[in-house]
Amino acid sequence: MELDRIAIHDSVDIVFPPQQLVDALSDLPVTVEAVTDGASFDRTDGVVAFGPGENFLDAGWVHCIRAGYDEFDVDDYEAAGVSLTNSTGIHGTTVGETVLGYLLAFARRLHRYRDRQNESAWVREPQSVPFTLAEKRICVIGLGTLGQGVVSRANGLGMEVVGVRRSGRETPGVETVYTPDELHAAVSDARFVVLTTPLTDETAGMIDASVLKTMREDAYLINVARGPVVVENALIDALSSGSIAGAGLDVFETEPLPESSPLWDFENVILTPHVAAMTNAYHEDIAALVRENVTRISNGDELYNHVI
Ligand code: NDP
Ligand code: 7N6
């Protein structure tokens, strides 16, 4: 492919101002400019965007600034002969630290003390409630960039780490790696079940009522993957009946989470608005990925992180 221009689509603004990426790539030997919806493209254009957009199939290459490219119709890209690349590989630290935050808050009760601080209330949790993470079992479902970011931090806390991955491949820091058909066995004795898989036909609805029922009553579900990996109504039922202890949720079936969702009202749920990966350096990580592929395009090499 011949590359003359990189168009930074304004959909990236949900994560960083487009101009930050324009500036970070300004030394490239191609035109780099911000564009909005309605812009037209041709086969010499690369487009950097948050999600799918108008006229993208006219470009030569589209780079998604997210790891999860589930909103893109991959078949359309293949049929149009347009390269699609994603941003897996950059979120291990951000999401790993966010998950660590949920774990520490639940164990050390920080979310409850913040609730009470809002009411100027000096009230201690019952003695039986706080616990430590050391030696507790965590099950990480999906052992790629996000999963390994969680695993290394859980290792650092002295937790017992098990996991699930499609291939069942051995993974550093994970004592037992299960395959998806062993999901119930994997979650059954874990105090924390952390979801770090892509949203695919296989993972949609993977955490359903039967999996939630298999989890321990004192277990927490953490979802930093995609909302539809969990059957949200089944989760609400499990939280209402106390069949699990709580949940840390960054992603939801519908985003933004509707005001009417019961999930807002559980004191044992920590909700974050799809920000587990947010960082003021996000544009730098994207710039490095784009730069790598500009080099590969000029050398005629296969694109890094290519989906299509
Ligand atoms: P990776 O491709 O690095 O890792 C995906 C992992 O999921 C792999 O270990 C893979 O197994 C495993 N997997 C795939 N299918 C299944 C399955 N059916 N059952 C169990 N494991 C499975 O992706 P990332 O870690 O970079 O990102 C994962 C997802 O997290 C993204 O697709 C995105 O949806 C979400 N995400 C959310 C963010 C947020 O802001 N909340 C930020 C970044 C990502 P194997 O390796 O064996 O094939
Ligand atoms: C940007 C979120 C992904 O899939 O959804 C995430 O990479 C990105 C803060």
Image: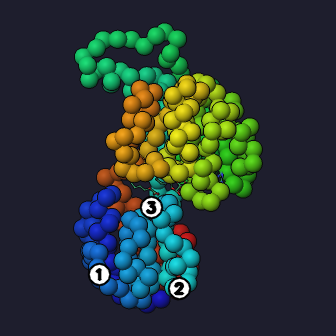
Q: Nearer the viewer, residue 52 or 29?
A: 52
**Judging from the image, what secondary structure is the residue with disc 3 in?**
loop
Amino acid type, label 2: Gly
Question: Does residue 157 appear in this view?
Answer: no
Q: Report the residue at 36% width, 57% height from top.
A: 282
Type of the residue with mark 3: Arg
Name the image quarter holding residue 33. Answer: bottom left
Question: Vertical placement of 17 versus 274: above or below?
Answer: below
Label 2 crowd (10 A; few <14 / some 14-19 / many >=20): some
Q: Is residue 273 above or below residue 119?
A: below
> Looking at this rendering, what residue extends furthest in the front direction?
260
Q: Is residue 252 visible?
A: yes
Q: Tell me the distance, in whole angstroms, between the alpha carbons under discs 3 and 1.
A: 21 Å
Residue 21 is situated, as x and y percent measured from the top left of the image, at: 30, 67
- Image spot of residue 275 (x, y percent): 38, 48
Q: Earlier in the sequence, mark 2 or mark 3?
A: 3
CA separation in Å, label 2 and label 3? 21 Å
Residue at point 47%, 50% (across, down): 253
User: Is disc 1 placed on a helix, strand or loop?
Assistant: loop
Give neighbour class at mark 3: few <14, some 14-19, many 20+ (Cα, 10 Å): many
Does residue 299 appear to the left or right of 187 in the view shown?
left
Q: Mark 1 or mark 3, which is nearer the start of the sequence?
A: 1
Determine which of the numbered discs, if any, sits on residue 81 in the image. 2
Judging by the rendered image, the residue that carries numbered circle 3 is: 66
Mark 3 in CB contact with mark 1 (< 8 angstroms): no
Mark 3 close to ligand 2, CB under 8 Å: yes
What is the number of the mark on residue 39?
Answer: 1
Circle 2: element type: loop
Between the C-alphas of marks 2 and 1, the distance is 20 Å
Give the vertical position of 56 relative to 269 (above or below).
below
